[in-house]
Image (cartoon, grey):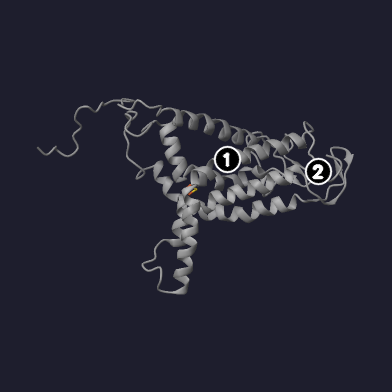
Amino acid sequence: MARAAGTVTAPHKLGFLATLRSDGWWVEPALVAVGLSVFLGYLTVSAFLDEWAFEVGPYLTPVFEPKLAGVSDYFWFSPALFVLWVPIGFRATCYYYRRAYYRSYFLSPPGCAVGDAPKNYKGEAVFPFIMQNLHRFFMYGALVFIPILWYGAFRSFYNTEEIIRGVEAETGFGIGLGSMFLCVNAFLLMMYTFSCHSFRHLIGGGLDCYSCSNFSKARKSLWDRVSVWNQNHRLYAWASLVWIASTDLYIRLVANGHITDPNTWSGF
Ligand code: FES
């Protein structure tokens, strides 16, 4: 006999967290909740710590890149906020992060075939979640940051400061561990952006025919490449998040004299 559409019959369970799953379905959302809280929490605090030095020699933490202003007089304001609203909006509306925090923070749902938190869900059609539809526009903004971050990474190979933390320092070209941190950071943030679903659509979407012109053929071949990156989007999302926090912490520890950067210059 045909089952009426929308009905749920035994052996299903209903209710918050109700499930027939016997595997450790809760491990991933729990780890994601901890990871997001630790790394996003650190970066939020860091953005407001503009009096705890965030640059030294040729190194500038990527949280403050590009540096549009110096230290703020107001504890509640930070020069990082001039630029951070773009990457924050980009991550907050990211398709992967949406899934992650809907599951881990809103428990909506906590996992596949696991009972939803009680809610009055209206999808992403009303405020505030209708703002998720701005993702493609944040993606355009994020593209601007790729050359900016690479500029910061390449600039870190040339020291112009003669005195660093009161000690005479060499100037000119060189290389240090901080330069490596900044290059890896620029690469991971670039790949996070290039593996974005909206970027994939920008490259290959809206085409009716992939073989009708040389231009559409070129878009197809680029779209194939972006599609491979897109399969690893979650990996790039986490790697870039962990790395930008690590880079910020490393440069601040060097800038404030807690550790010494191994480099070919002298003085820091
Ligand atoms: Fe994650 Fe666009 S889908 S950055």
- Dot 1, crowdedness within 10 Å: few (<14), some or many (≥20)? many
Tell me: residue 152, above or below residue 251. below
- Dot 2, crowdedness within 10 Å: few (<14), some or many (≥20)? some
Q: How many labels sit on residues? A: 2
Image mark for residue 241? 1
Residue 145 in sight from this viewpoint: yes
Quadrant assignment, res 116: top left
Of the two numbered discs 2 and 1 on the same chain, state the one appearing first in sequence.
1
Residue at screen point 44% across, 31% down: 29
Tell me: residue 210, above or below residue 41. below
* Horizontal relation, residue 62 to residue 107: left or right: right
* Horizontal relation, residue 173 to residue 19: left or right: right
Residue nearest the observer in this picture, 44 or 58: 58
> Residue beneath label 2, please?
263
Which type of secondary structure does the marked residue at label 1 adopt?
helix
Amino acid of disc 2: Asn
Residue 196 in sight from this viewpoint: no
User: Measured from the top left, where is residue 263 in percent x and y?
Assistant: 81, 43
How far apart are the two marked residues, 2 and 1, measured between alpha carbons? Answer: 25 Å
User: Measured from the top left, where is residue 257 in percent x and y?
Assistant: 79, 33
Q: Residue furthest front?
A: 23
Which type of secondary structure does the marked residue at label 2 adopt?
loop
